[in-house]
Image (cartoon, coloured by chain):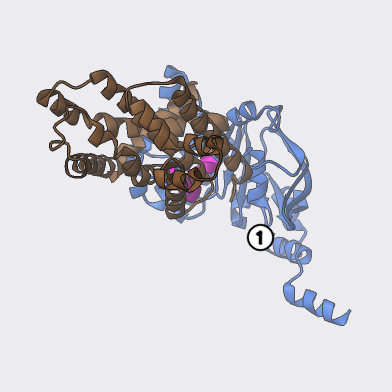
Amino acid sequence: MRNTLTLFRREFWSYFATPLAFVFIVIFLLLAGALAFYLGGFYERGQADLAPFFNYHPWLYLFLIPALSMRLWAEERKSGTIELLMTLPVTLWQAVIGKYLAAWAFAGVALVLTFPIWITVNYLGDPDNGAILAAYIGSFLMAGGFLAIGSCISAATRNQVIAFIFTVVLCFGFLLSGFPMVLGLFDGWAPRAIVDAVASLSFLTHFASISKGVIDVRDLLYFGILIGVWLLATAIVLEMKKAD
Amino acid sequence: MIEIKHLTKRYGELLAVDDISFDVAPGQVLGFLGPNGAGKSTTMKMITGFLSPTAGSVRVCGHDLESAPLAAKSCMGYLPEGAPSYPEMTVRSFLEFIADIRGLSADVRKRRLDDVIGRLALSSVLEQVIETLSKGFKRRVGLAQALLHDPQVLILDEPTDGLDPNQKHEVRSLINDMSRDKIIVISTHILEEVDAVCNRAIIIASGRILADDTPKNLAARAPSGRLDDVFRTITTAATPRAIPAAEGAAHA
C-alpha cells in the first residue's frame, strides 16, 4: 500500500513536470467546451442539462486518453527505467496499480476542471444536479476503462506511437460495439441475446445509462471488471516480456 | 553473501548464460569481465531479480530471488547498464523517491541522503532536472540511487562507462572505500579497472565462466604478465571467430 502510494505520487507529479499536463488539460477543456456548444447545441436546445457536454466524452476520450496512457509503460521500457523499477523492492502489482491510478487521477483532474460548464448550466437554469454528478462519475469510470486498455497496450511495446494507435483502435472497437450502426448489423437475424451481449460490451451503453442519472450496480460492475481484467493483462504482459 | 547455482538463461535458441555457479563473500570486490554479449549483463539482471532464470537459483543475503524477491531486492543496490533514471525529475526528488520506496525512516533518510549527496558531489545539481545533466552527473545520480539505503550487496553494471578519467578515479576510490564489509560486483571491459578495484575477477564468454581468480594470479598466466593478454587469450580461444568456423565446415 505504502509502495503503491509512493509510485502513484511519483507518476502523478511527473505529468506536471512536463508540458504534457498543460497541453492535455487545455486541449481537453477546449474540445469539451467546443463540442458541447457548437455540435451539441448547448444553448439552442434550451434545456438545463449537460447532455450535449457528456455526449461527446466517449469520442473525446477516444483520442485523448490513449495520448495519456501511451507513455505509461512504453516510456519506462524505452528509457530503461523499467529495470530500475523492477529491481526496487516493489511488486509488479504495486507498480501496475500505482502507475495506473496516477494516470486515472490525472484524467480526473482534467475532468474536474470542466466545472465552469456546471456553473454555467446552474446559472442559466435549474438542472438535475444529481444526474450531472452521476454523469461525471460515469465519465470518470469510462476514462478509467480507456486507460486500463491503454496501460496494457503500452506495456506491450517500447514505441509510444504504436501504443497510441493500437489503443485508439481497440478503444474504438469497445465504443462501436454499442453503436446503432453496428447493432443494426446483428439486429435483423441474430437472436436478441447476442445483440444484447454485443451491446453490453460497449462503453457507450454503460456510459449512457449512468449519464441518465441512474447508477446501476451492473454498470459499476462492468467498469470494475473491465479495468481489473485489463490491469491483469498489463501485469501478465510485463511479466512475459520484461526485458524486451 | 551471494550464492549462484547452475544459473542458466535461454532466449529461444540462444543460450545467453550457460550453467554458471559461484559464490561471493563479504569483502570481495568481484570484477565481471568478458567481451560484449558474453552474458555479463544477463547474469547481473538475474542476480538483481529483473530477469527470471531459465534454470538454477540465486540467493542474496540468504534470500532466494525466486521465493523471496522483495527481501533479496531490499538488501541490494543496483546500477543498471546506462544508469537509467527518470529524466523529468530533479535529482533531489528522484533520490527522495528512491528513499521512500526503500522505506527509509525519517532520520535515517536525512542522514543517508546527505551521505550519498556528499559522497557523489551532487549538491550543486540537486534542484536540476536529470534530463539536463551531463553524462558524468547522470551516472553519479545512478550510483547515488544504488548506495542510498547502504546495501550489503552492490551490483554495478559498467559503473564508470562514459566518465572522464577524473570521474573514473573518483568512482574507483568510492568503491575502494566501501569494499571492506560489502559485497560488490562490477562488470566492465576496462581491464585496468579490475586491477584498480577488484580483488577477484571472473572472465566470462559465451555464457560460461572461463577463469575465476585474483587479478594478480590471472595476469601471471600470460608471459607478459598483463591482464589484457590473458583476457584476449582466454576469450578468443573460447569464442572461435566466424571465419575459421566456416572454413572448418567447408573442410568437413
x, y (%) of residue A21?
Answer: 29, 40
x, y (%) of residue A244?
Answer: 58, 51
Q: How many marks?
A: 1
Q: Quadrant of residue B124?
A: top left
Q: Is residue B181 above or below residue A158?
A: above
Q: B107 or B52, which lies in front? A: B52
Q: Would residue B26 be seen by someone viewing this image from the given angle? A: yes
Q: Is residue B65 left or right of residue B188?
A: right
Q: Quadrant of residue A128?
A: top left
Residue in the image at 67% along x and 62% along y: B228
Q: Chain of mark 1?
A: B
Kindly give the residue lying farthest to the bottom in the view shown.
B251
Instruction: Answer few, some or many: residues within 10 Å of disc 1's Cα (few below 14, many 20 plus, some between 14 and 19).
Output: some
* Span shown in magenta: A72-84
Chain A tint in image: brown
x, y (%) of residue B174?
Answer: 51, 40
Residue in the image at 83% along x and 81% along y: B250
Q: Is residue B135 left or right of residue A243?
A: left
Q: Is residue A113 above or below residue B218?
A: above
Residue A151 counted in the magenta span: no
- Give the letter of the blue chain: B
Q: Which residue is mark 1?
A: B35
x, y (%) of residue B116?
Answer: 44, 33
Q: Would residue B170 be seen by someone viewing this image from the given angle? A: no
Q: Is residue A240 above or below residue B191?
A: above
Q: A242 or A135, which lies in front? A: A135
- Examine the residues drawn in magenta and state their main secondary structure: helix
Residue type at mark 1?
Pro
Q: Is residue B139 left or right of residue B69?
A: left
Q: A139 or B78, which lies in front? A: A139
Residue in the image at 62% along x and 49% along y: B187
Residue A77 counted in the magenta span: yes
